[in-house]
Amino acid sequence: MKTEYEKMVCGEYYDSLSEEILVHVRRARALCDRLTEFKSDEEEKSRIIKELFGTTGEKVAVNPPFTCDHGEHIHVGENFFANYDCTIMDACDVRIGKNCLLGPKVSIFSVGHPLDAELRAKRLAIAKPVTIGDNVWIGGNAVICPGVKIGNNVVVAAGAVVTKDLPDNVLAGGNPAKIIKKI
């Protein structure tokens, strides 16, 4: 029988408030709090991010406050930057390529809850990986939903809600986000 953590990372319904899951969440919260403590020390912030995230490039920067569920499922490439108040809910893999910029208040969700009210009442959640290519800029207040894949060289306009995959070399915006033009 699978543990709740195993169910989570495999994309099955899992108890989002099980003690097994909360151990990981508490670790991430503590490290996110440390980021805020060292908000003026770029070297220490980088060290904390490298401890928090699953993998990183050499050069990464995050402006606190920053929030994530687990941290260990976040994988970012070289020259990653997240501006103030970014949230990454990483119940399963969130993979972000190199040279990516996240504007203020960007939210990336790899987790959601069932539509069925009875299942939600049981505290169940389900995770789907998010993949973001290289050279992507996501504007402030944009939301990336579970299971979305964003190609290379994409710009997501501020305030967009990305519910479907985006191919390479496009500008997308709106709610739900639609391709505005090729770039």
Image (tube, rainbow, N blue to C red):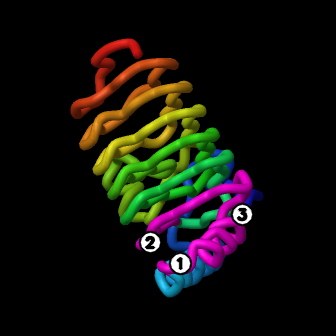
Residue found farthest to the top: 182
**Residue 151 against residue 148 in the figure, above or below:** above
Q: From where the camera sits, is residue 19 visible? A: no
Q: Of the residues shown, which amino acid type is indicated by label 2?
A: Pro
Q: Earlier in the sequence, mark 1 or mark 3?
A: 3
Q: Are marks 2 and 1 in contact (CB under 8 Å)?
A: yes
Residue 59 falls in image quadrant: bottom right
Q: Of the residues shown, which amino acid type is indicated by label 1?
A: Leu
Q: Which residue is mark 1?
A: 35
**Residue 87 at what x, y percent from top left?**
43, 60
Give the CA distance from mark 1 to mark 3. 30 Å
Left or right: 173, with 63 as reference point:
left
**2 vs 3, front mark:** 2
Q: From where the camera sits, is residue 183 visible? A: yes
Q: Are marks 1 and 3 in contact (CB under 8 Å)?
A: no
Q: Earlier in the sequence, mark 2 or mark 1?
A: 1
Left or right: 171, with 98 as reference point:
left
Element assignment for label 1: helix
Q: Which residue is mark 2?
A: 64
Q: Which residue is mark 3?
A: 3
Residue found farthest to the bottom: 37
Magenta range is: 39-68
Badge 1 density bin: few <14, some 14–19, many ≥20, Cα 10 Å: many
Q: Residue shown at 59%/33% (left/top)?
A: 134
**Residue 148 at what x, y percent from top left?**
48, 34
Q: Between 142 and 154, which is closer to the camera in this rendering?
A: 154
**Residue 114 against residue 165 in the figure, above or below:** below
Give the CA distance from mark 2 to mark 1. 6 Å
